[in-house]
Amino acid sequence: MAMAVGRPPANDRGVSRDVEAAPTNGTLKPASSSGVGVVEDLQLRVANLEKLLHVSVEASGLNVSAPQVGSQSPAFSLTNDAGQPQSTAPEPYTLIVKGQRSRYHGPNDRVTLLSQFQEIKDFVNSIPKDSPSIITLVKDIEYLQKDPRIKFMFRRKSALQNARPMTVLEESLPSKKTCDRLFNIYVDQSEKTRRILHVPSLLRNYEGLWKSNGRNFDTSAFLPLLMTILAIGHTLDDGNDSGYQNDEKSYLHHAALDDVEDLIRRIDKKHRIDFATLQTETLLVIARQIRGCTADELWRATGSLVRSATIMGLHLNPARLNKISPFQAELRRRLWTTILQMDLDASIAANMPIANTLLDFDGMIPTNIDDKDFDESTEVLPPSKPLSEWTDALPQVVLAMALPQQFKIIGLMRSAPPGTDLTQTVEEGRKLKDFVESLLILRLDATSHGGIDVWKRISANICVRRPLLHLYSIIIRQDSPMGANFADLQQFCLESSVSVLNYRDHFDPMVIDPSTTNSNSSWKLFNVYFKNDVILAFLTICQHIRSLTTKPQKLDQNPVSAHTRGSDTLATDPQFTKAKLIRLLENTLDSLIESSADTGTDIKDILFLSVAIQSVRSGSTGKVKKKMMRDGAMKALSAYRESLLRSCSDTDIQLPSQTRNSVIDEVTSNSDEILMRVTSET
């Protein structure tokens, strides 16, 4: 079922101002003076931020105005006209300024979300003064999270030190036994929703490499791609090191990706635009993402991929191009869709603009066929199968069909100033919601397709719903008028949030049958790709629980009456009772803590979520509420520390809390980042 949607507005990072430009008079955190103490400075930075901004703007005589939709003026409009009125609506972002440094945090960043929960913000402010035990736990956890291994691995001095990059890859290729193991892990766990390669062709090239023994086989294009695949397989390995050599593990873990990137940097311009090179670059970005690169780094990398793909013409309908075979045309559609999806996901995660500005999807949807149905010799692709029939390509086909509408929703969200009527955005969200609900084959309760890979269904479901969850999160933080569609959107987003948290149970090694799936690899991927979705779903449910105990306003006076009606309807739904939702949140938090050693759960997320539960579960106020939040944080952080200790091989480890001379050196200036840098007095 195709969606009848208009062409999404064009946007670009720092270029298109009518869609992606963010309001510029948001929450501003000025640098502190050197004469203020650490605790007082922290409290000062987070108190009355909007008032501080208003004062600073009036004092400077500058007018910082937010761009309107369709405006062609620059994103930052600075004039000396101090007479124009300033917007009083809360801004959906935070800007932290320290001297010449500045850091932007978008609408759904943790720093901005903290302002959504004033009680949590006040509690975090008070931690340095009132909760030294929490600080002690944070110091211990930070110490345990430090990698005891050497952070920088210097390349071994050998004959390879000054060799050509291709020679380095050839000499560093692991044994066939190791390659077979890691190659199969990649094939089994990847190429599901992010289609980059044609699996039968990949298998033929892999077998040809070993059969040729390096003779009569051009390794220049395939070897960098293979080495990246092996590095991904190594990261996803379940830990069974049988057959591994220490030098093979060390190389794949440290130097392999750097060597591939070094080779790509050195190739000439002609080979730089080779299709296999772009495939390798895309795999490199995925490999870096799986290894935990930051959201900012990922956003930069996916933007570069979009531009490289555009230079090669992947944004053009391949059916209209000469000298491109049906096989190559289909691979171009798949890779273009994958790159756009990766950039959309990275942009949402980093709260930054999307790189793509060319949204003509005519003829760009991949064909719904299996890999075995076509190859290099295919002269005419077989007809696309209906969406009710499962194929290797179906998850990506669904994502490709949803992309134009997702881009449109994100564009409208980013371009709307605070207080804007979001009825149009909600209407566009309804179209995407209707499309998702029409995809019966992706439902986990689709009994006729019980044998289909659960990962494919869940991954496609979360990716398609992601913009809606972010749209809903922004709407409920703004006193903006909304149409009747909002109640349906609210119901859908709450159901989706509950589903996202429950999806973890399908891959959590603590609860599933290990004989039914390769749980460890899928678990790693889930926590890499969907960590932010879990956190946003968690906070969405917290918002709903809070609304259950908030006295509603009269409907004829409430500018968000549809929001209130939706909350009233959900309050009577037996599956969304407060007790059930609290239990779901507690179980999710316990799972995040228990898996922290394997998944690298951020301590700031654990602190935020543990306090958020206690903040919304009770209608009490004052000291009673503060004690609940403190006890919740202590319980969660203590469990986090114990989880890390159980995974630590050093049984004689001495924590900072056990060292008398350990002191707090610095408290970060962000109220949600209550992390300490610890030094030891000598």
Image (cartoon, rainbow, N blue to C red):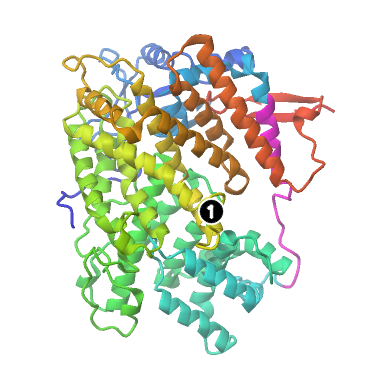
Q: Is residue 590 above or below residue 633?
A: below
Q: Does the image show residue 482? A: yes
Q: Report the front residue among 331 and 545.
A: 545
Magenta residue check for 153: yes
Which SS class for mark 1?
helix
Q: Quadrant of residue 639?
A: top right
Q: Report the front residue among 497 and 340.
A: 497
- In the rendered image, the quadrant that contains the C terminus is top right
Q: Amino acid at mark 1?
A: Lys
- What is the x, y in percent for residue 408? 24, 45
Number of numbered markers: 1
User: Which residue is tagged 1?
Assistant: 524
Q: Is residue 444 above or below residue 605?
A: below
Q: Residue at x 56, y 65 (%)?
A: 233
Q: Does the image show residue 107? A: no
Q: Is residue 651 above or below residue 520?
A: above
Q: Quadrant of residue 73?
A: top left
